[in-house]
Image (cartoon, rainbow, N blue to C red):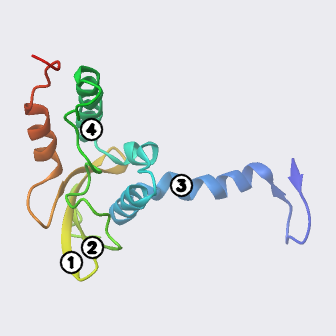
Amino acid sequence: TRLQGDWSSDVCSSDLALLIVAPLATAASDPRDVVTRLYDAIQAPQSNETAIAPLLGDALRSAIDAQRAYEQACTALAAPDEKPHMLDQSPYLLAPDRPETITVGAPGSSGDATWVHVDMAVGDYRWTDRVLLQRQGPDWKVMDIRWGQGGNLIGRLQAFSAFRCTPSGS
């Protein structure tokens, strides 16, 4: 298909597709953009796991998937009037409240791994998380999050899975 109009030359629709797709293909090659997209997805009214999963490194994505499956298994074992063992908030945030403001900093190095600072605030309370990224192939992937209040995402997932769910009444 050829498009004609007020162009200096004809533009083929496949050329337009390349213009649209090319920025999307290179977006994951910038650590700051990966972190920005991660926090945009976390801040969505319903955390957007389909947008988050491709931003995570393989090991972290597997750990998050295992945590979700574990929550489902614990829910199945719990009595209807019993709260199952589960995280009550986004696994990516330490604070139960979503930040009101988020500012993503520049990457901390130029090698195959880097830290990106993320400044956040709720009211007057401010903190800085650090996101560890590593290059996996052509893309930057999130490997862990170190929370300004202490602890990290990998540690939280490990502690969560150490608890053993048992059927109600056992």
Q: Position of residue 54 (x, y in %)?
A: 40, 43
Q: Residues within 10 Å of mark 1 (few under 14, many from 20)?
A: some
The quadrant where residue 69 appears: top left
- List the single residue furthest toward the front: 81
Mark 3 falls on what kind of element? helix
Q: Residues within 10 Å of mark 2 (few under 14, many from 20)?
A: some
Residue at the (17%, 49%) spot, across then down: 153
Q: Are marks 2 and 4 in contact (CB under 8 Å)?
A: no
What residue is shown with label 3? 24
The quadrant where residue 126 appears: bottom left
Mark 1 falls on what kind of element? strand
The quadrant where residue 111 appears: bottom left
Q: Position of residue 25 (x, y in %)?
A: 51, 51
Mark 2 falls on what kind of element? strand
What residue is shown with label 1? 126
Q: Residues within 10 Å of mark 4 (few under 14, many from 20)?
A: some
What residue is shown with label 2? 120
Tell me which label, 1 or 4, sits earlier in the chain: 4
Above or below, comparing residue 77 to residue 13 in the picture: above
What residue is shown with label 4? 64
Tell me which label, 3 or 2, sits earlier in the chain: 3
Disc 3 versus disc 2: distance between alpha carbons?
26 Å
